[in-house]
Every structure is written in structure tokens, then in C-alpha cells.
Image (tube, rainbow, N blue to C red):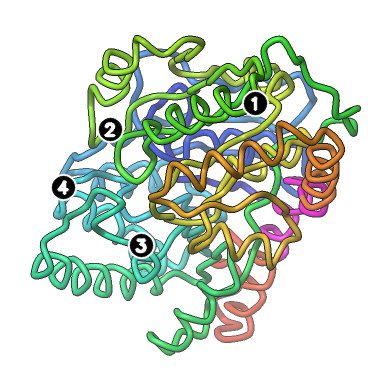
Amino acid sequence: MKLAIVTAYPPSKVTLNEYAYHLVKHFRQKEDITELVLLTDTTENKKDVEFTEAGCKITIKECWTFNSYTNILNVNKAINQVKPDTVLFNLQFMKFGDKKVAAALGLMLPLVCKLKNIPNIVLLHNILEEVDLGSAGFTSNKLMQKVYGFIGSTLTRLILQADTVAVTMQKYVDILEEKYNAKNVKLIPHGTFEIPEEPDYKVPKAPMQIMTFGKFGTYKKVEGMIEAVEKVRQSTGLDLEVIIAGTDNPNVPGYLAKVQEDYKHVPKVRFTGYVEEHEVPTLFNESAVVVFPYTSTTGSSGVLHQAGSYGKAVVMPDLGDLALLVQDEGYRGEFFEPTSVESLAKAIENIVTNDTYRKALGKANYQAATAHPMSQITEMYLNTFETIILNKINENPTNTKEVML
């Protein structure tokens, strides 16, 4: 199978680029894959496809740009040139741009593949029905939220024209089937990027690191976390360091710089900036607690799966998809009220003052993370492609050669 993946890819800063990296890393080791073609956004620096493991050939074709109105034409042209057997889209609604028309045009590409009779799957990381548009930074205006809702429903119907739409949570399957009467939606878990050897669950204590990781400024805000850790320091006397790892959300440029200035009087607050892939293990291994300072959620959390793979205790808001992941996949953590600094401080304190409890949470999360390795997830996608191809053959036996090609 010659598999094309339409995605952002490192060193791109467009959303879901890290997920694509790990998809590619594991797809390339599958015997059924003869070539991977990455249909990516353009970046100044070279794409990161240097892997230590042996694998299939990788071809990179940079053919789209964030917020470009011509992405649908350029990606379609690239597909015509490389002639893949199958196409996987690694998507969320703002994948191709944060301008409405540019985003919508890009999301028409699965329909284009369907019309060209190319077996295709959309991996849809979130659905607008489960996004708080105000908290997530889209709009707080009630009228505009209704407009966004209408646009979102229209785009969802476009995406559902794909042969299969894969989502990462059972609740998403239920909503799409009920609201849109969809028959082509499938649950494929998010998966865990790396499965290191089980850790010893020991962490540095001088200082003990309280870490958060992501793109900040919309529904992920760190002021409350800094203030909460300050409260824990005062109440316990513990030596705690706040680690804020990551960058601004593209919609809120300058957010972290302002936070850094506003809280420069607070000791032991470290901003790492962008975290390179090879730096991720050290970041997690040295952290005692991983905090999710979210006021909303927009999909299954890759950071939660990473935290689990390194055996970390987590502190999460009691809302939306994170609470569902705990229920569905077996993760454990301390919960807090999303807008309460006091609640967050209490959750952090419960972990950092009880080493036995911290280790128990880490062990539970490691077990949850190891249940869905990326090698298993990529195998599920290959099996789904095989089913799509067989269905196309059964529907039109005279077109077998075209489908297989």
C-alpha cells in the first residue's frame, strides 16, 4: 500500500504536527506499507523524518499553507502527481486555517478523494458539538456562536463524505451517529506516542517540578497554576518549581511573554519555549506532577497520554473530554474546579505531600497508556483501509483494478 497522509508535520507549528510524527514513525514499520507520502504544509526548515528504526520509503511533498485559499487545489494536484492507493487526513476544524473560508475549503479534500474513488479516512480529533466556543477562543458572542454552530454542522457533513471518519472517543461516535445519522464513523483511540520501560516513579525533590505542556492562551491558561503553586509553597514549605513547557496558541501571540512579565516576581517559574521531540522524555521524567490548566477541552488529550506513558500523576479539570478519558481508558488523577485557584492548589497539594499516592496515580496512568500503543493504532487504520477497499470492490466488481490502484 502506498499511503498518503495529509497533515502538518514537524517542524511545523500547525496543530497536530506532533501526532503526525508518531503516526509516521509507526506506519513506516508496517510490512503492508511500501511507501509513505507526506502531503504537508510548507516550512522553512527540513522535515523531521530521520528515524533510527528501519522502515519503508518516505516521500515528502509540501503542498499547502495555513490560511491559503488554494490549498484544495494544491493538495488535489499533489494527489494526482503521487497517485496514492489510500489517503489519511489528520484533521481538526482549524487545520488548514483560522479564516473561515480557508478552513472550509481545506476540509473539502476528503470529498474530493471520495469523488476520485481513492479510499480515504479522516482522523477527526475534535467535533464542534463538544467545544465551548467562548473558552476555546473562537467567540463569546452568542449570535456568532450560533453562526459557528451552523458552519460547524455544514463542515461536519462535508467531512462525513469520507469513506470512514475515525474519532478518538466513544462520545464523538454517538453524537455523529445521532445528529448526522452517520454510518461511517469508527472509534480508533488516540493512542500513546511512546511506551518507555516502566519507570521507577522516583522524581527529583529539590526542587519538585510541577509541569504543564501545550499551546497556551485560549482555554489553556497558566496564571491560575502559578498562583496555585504559590499557595502550596506557603502551606507546605515544599521546594516547588513551575515548568511551563510550550508556546503561545497561534490565536493569542504574546500571551506567555505577558505572563512571564506579570509573574516575574514569583520565584522558580520556568518557561521552556518550544520543546523539541528529543527533549520530551527529559521534560516528563523530571516532573513530579503534570497539570492541565484548562477551562475547556477540544478533544482527546495527547499530553495526558504522554504523561501516562511516563508514569506521571496528573491534575485535571473536572470537565468534558478529560473526565471522559478517565472513565473510558482508566486514567486517574486529582480533579479541580476549572476556575478555582484554591481547588487547583488543593489538588496539587494532595499529590506532592503524599508520595505513595503520587506513585499510585503514576502506575495507574502508565497502565492506561500502555493499553493503546501507536503500533496498535496504526494497525487499526490499515485494517480499516482494507475494509474500505473490499467494500468498494464488492460494490463495483468491474472497477476492481481502479480501486486497487
Q: Is mark 3 on a helix, strand or loop?
A: loop
Query: Could you tell which of marks 1 and 4 lies nearer the N-terminus?
Result: 4
Query: Mark 1, mark 4: which one is toward the viewer?
Result: 1
Look at the image and say whether residue 370 sits in the magenta stretch: yes
Q: Could you say where residue 160 lies in the image, as x and y percent from the top left?
A: 40, 73
Give the vertical position of 17 relative to 142 (above or below).
above
Query: Mark 2, mark 1: which one is toward the viewer?
Result: 1
Residue occupying the point 40% across, 47% down:
79
Q: What stretch is highlighted in magenta?
A: 369-383
- Spatial CA distance of label 4 from label 3 is 18 Å
Residue occupying the point 26% across, 50% down:
72
Q: Is residue 109 left or right of residue 82?
A: left
Give the vertical position of 107 relative to 391 (above or below).
above
Residue occupying the point 41% across, 13% down:
266
Q: Classify 10 Å Cα crowding around label 3: few (below 14), some (14-19), many (20 and above).
A: some
- Spatial CA distance of label 2 from label 1 is 37 Å
- Spatial CA distance of label 1 from label 4 is 47 Å
> Are dots 4 and 3 in contact, CB under 8 Å?
no
Q: Is the magenta stretch mostly helix, strand or loop?
A: helix
Q: Is mark 2 on a helix, strand or loop?
A: loop
Query: Could you tell which of marks 4 and 3 lies nearer the N-terminus?
Result: 4
Query: Mark 4, mark 3: which one is toward the viewer?
Result: 3
Q: Name the residue under label 3.
A: 131
> Are dots 2 and 4 in contact, CB under 8 Å?
no
The amino acid marked with disc number 1 is Thr
Residue 250, numbered label: 2
Residue 236, numbered label: 1
**Quarter the C terminus occupies:** bottom right
Q: Is mark 4 on a helix, strand or loop?
A: loop
Q: Could you say where residue 314 lies in the image, as x and y percent from the top left?
A: 66, 42
Q: Mark 4 points at which residue?
A: 99
